[in-house]
Each structure stands twice: as structure tokens, then as C-alpha cells.
């Protein structure tokens, strides 16, 4: 199946100045049948109908109550049946509860669940409230945050989110969440240190002490893991994958990938697909 996927990496920003876009849509309103990702976090909730989703190479059946959260690093494509109705809520990280964002960012699997009828009804009410508040001008950020937090908590209750960073100090958890959400942008040590409110030198030292690896090693692991996913689930060229994952040059990508995986990207793709 991977060879048949045509890839479109969508970087459309959230249009709303408030950092949130909330809509109730029909399947005929838009198409998602090409592999893509976004530069923001997204919640989609199916309220009627259904279809198929391919998320990070795994195929899921969508039905009434299906809810999934998409991070910037998640690649997906969706094919919905005619007359399907769903909510699409896209938001910037600054609107979300910090602890929930940390859990979402550090979760190792796909963020998917199916809500029961009572839970779905609550999630619909919260989604409708977000849509109504987003249309109110001027929008009240505090209200948006509260409603979004309730919706994310409802999703979190059904997805076994667990962060392996609970034992880390708070600034480091913030930094890791930022890296996990933005590694494709190749954030510098200085940029991430600012997220943790540390100066660059102190942050570098703290990172190594708490993570038992350097900042660049951790960042490279995130980028290599993403590259492995793209190699397995798309027909993108090796050069394009290296660029997409934040590597500054093809030679840098080839060197780092072989250092961490033990083989070249091309050989990894060939060997994995032949199994």
C-alpha cells in the first residue's frame, strides 16, 4: 500500500487570529484522501457516517464516535463515506493546557479512540461551544481555553495517555514537549532553552544531566524516527524525506540515519518492505 500513497505535506496555518479554528463539516465539504500533516494540533470527531483513516502507516476504521488527535508530526489520510458529518478543531499549543500538551506530545502511539453515546453527546456539546465562542468577536481566550481543556480531558480519559517524563523537572518537560511537536522545524538549542526559560549554556547542561544524552542526539533521534515512518509509509524520495524531517542537507541525513539505524535510508526501506 505504501507505494501507492501520493504525498501532500500541508502546511496551511490556522487562519484565526485567536489560534483556533472550529467547524462542523460534511464529508463532501473537503477532501483528505492524500497523505498530509499540519503545523498545528487537530481534533477530529465523527458524529455520523464513517470511513477509513491511515495514520502513521496504520489503517483505522472510522465510525460514529471516532475521535482522534493529530500532532504536527502525524501523517494521515482520511476517506469518509458520503454524508458523513464530523467536527474539525484545529488549535495552537498556547490555547491548550500545558500538562495535556506534554502528554499528547510524548505519547508514543496514535491518539485514537471511540466514544460511547453519552461521551459523544458531551463532546458534541463542547465542540459546538467552541464553534460558537470562536465566532464571537472579540473572542475571549479564557473561555476558549476552558472549553478546549474540557474537550481534551474527555479525549484523554479514553486514550491511555502516559508521559514517561513525569519524573523530570517542569522546565525540561516543557522543552521536550516543544521538541516533540516541532522537531521537523529543526529547533536550535537556543530556541528550546527559551521555552524552558533557561539560558542556553545552563539548559544544555541540564538536558544532558536529565536525559543522559545531548540535545542534538535527542533531536536527531526524533528526526530519524520520523524518517523511518516516512520511508515505510510513503513513496517520497530519500532527499525529500531528509528535508521534511529537518535535516539540513542530504549528506547530513544519510550520515545521521546510518549512525542511528545502522543502514542507509534506501536499504532500510528496501529491507523493510520486502519482509
Image (cartoon, helix red, strand yellow):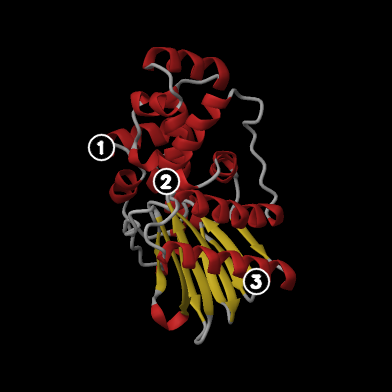
For residue 99, above or below residue 54: above
For residue 103, above or below residue 42: above
Q: Residue at x 55, y 30 (%)?
A: 173
Residue 249: image tag: 1
Q: How many marks?
A: 3
Snapshot quadrant of residue 91: bottom left
Q: Give left or right: position of 60 versus 158.
A: left
Single out the mark in the foreground, 2 or 3: 3
Q: Give left or right: position of 265 versus 172.
A: left
Q: Give left or right: position of 166 versus 216.
A: right
On the image, numbered disc 3 is attached to which residue? 65
At numbered mark 2, what does the secondary structure look like: helix, strand or loop? helix
Assess disc 1: are there few (<14), some (14-19) or many (≥20) residues with their C-alpha within 10 Å of its C-alpha: few
In front of the other: 20 or 44: 20
Q: Sequence-wise, which precedes: disc 1 or disc 3? A: 3
> From this viewpoint, is residue 262 visible?
no
- The single residue placed furthest to the front in the displayed view is 138
Snapshot quadrant of residue 236: bottom left
> From this viewpoint, is residue 233 visible?
yes
Whole-number angstrom distance, CA of label 2 to CA of label 1? 14 Å
At numbered mark 3, what does the secondary structure look like: helix, strand or loop? loop
Q: Residue at x 64, y 57 (%)?
A: 155
Residue 155: image tag: none
Whole-number angstrom distance, CA of label 1 to CA of label 3? 43 Å
| Image quadrant where one finds the C terminus | bottom right
Assess disc 3: are there few (<14), some (14-19) or many (≥20) residues with their C-alpha within 10 Å of its C-alpha: many
For residue 80, above or below residue 217: below
Q: Sequence-wise, which precedes: disc 2 or disc 1? A: 2
On the image, numbered disc 2 is attached to which residue? 227
Q: Residue at x 49, y 87 (%)?
A: 82
At numbered mark 1, what does the secondary structure look like: helix, strand or loop? loop
Q: Position of residue 227 (x, y in %)?
A: 42, 46
Amino acid at each position: 500500500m505504501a507505494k501507492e500513497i501520493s504525498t501532500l505535506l500541508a502546511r496551511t496555518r490556522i487562519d484565526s487570529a485567536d489560534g483556533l479554528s472550529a467547524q462542523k463539516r460534511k464529508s463532501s465539504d473537503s477532501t483528505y484522501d492524500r497523505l498530509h500533516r499540519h503545523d498545528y494540533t487537530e481534533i477530529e470527531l465523527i458524529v455520523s457516517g464513517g470511513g477509513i483513516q491511515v495514520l502513521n502507516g496504520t489503517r483505522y476504521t472510522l465510525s460514529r464516535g471516532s475521535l482522534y488527535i493529530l500532532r504536527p508530526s502525524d501523517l494521515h489520510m482520511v476517506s469518509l463515506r458520503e454524508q458523513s458529518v464530523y467536527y474539525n478543531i484545529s488549535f495552537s499549543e498556547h490555547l491548550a493546557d500545558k500538562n495535556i500538551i506534554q502528554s499528547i506530545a510524548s505519547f508514543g502511539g496514535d491518539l485514537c479512540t471511540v466514544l460511547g453515546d453519552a461521551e459523544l453527546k458531551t463532546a458534541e456539546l463542547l465542540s459546538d461551544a467552541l464553534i460558537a465562542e470562536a465566532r464571537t468577536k472579540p473572542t475571549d481566550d479564557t473561555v476558549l481555553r476552558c472549553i478546549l481543556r474540557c474537550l481534551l480531558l474527555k479525549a484523554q480519559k479514553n486514550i491511555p495517555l502516559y508521559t514517561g517524563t513525569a519524573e523530570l523537572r517542569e522546565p525540561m518537560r516543557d522543552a521536550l514537549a516543544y521538541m516533540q511537536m516541532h522537531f521537523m522545524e529543526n529547533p536550535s538549542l537556543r530556541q528550546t532553552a527559551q521555552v524552558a526559560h533557561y539560558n542556553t549554556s545552563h539548559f544544555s547542561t541540564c538536558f544532558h544531566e536529565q536525559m543522559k544524552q545531548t540535545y542534538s542526539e535527542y533531536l536527531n533521534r526524533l528526526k530519524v524516527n520520523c524518517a523511518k515512518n516516512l520511508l515505510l509509509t510513503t513513496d517520497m524520495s530519500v532527499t525529500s524525506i531528509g528535508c521534511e524531517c529537518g535535516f539540513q542537507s542530504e549528506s547530513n541525513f544519510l550520515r545521521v540515519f546510518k549512525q542511528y539505524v545502522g543502514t542507509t535510508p534506501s536499504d532500510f526501506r528496501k529491507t523493510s518492505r520486502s519482509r
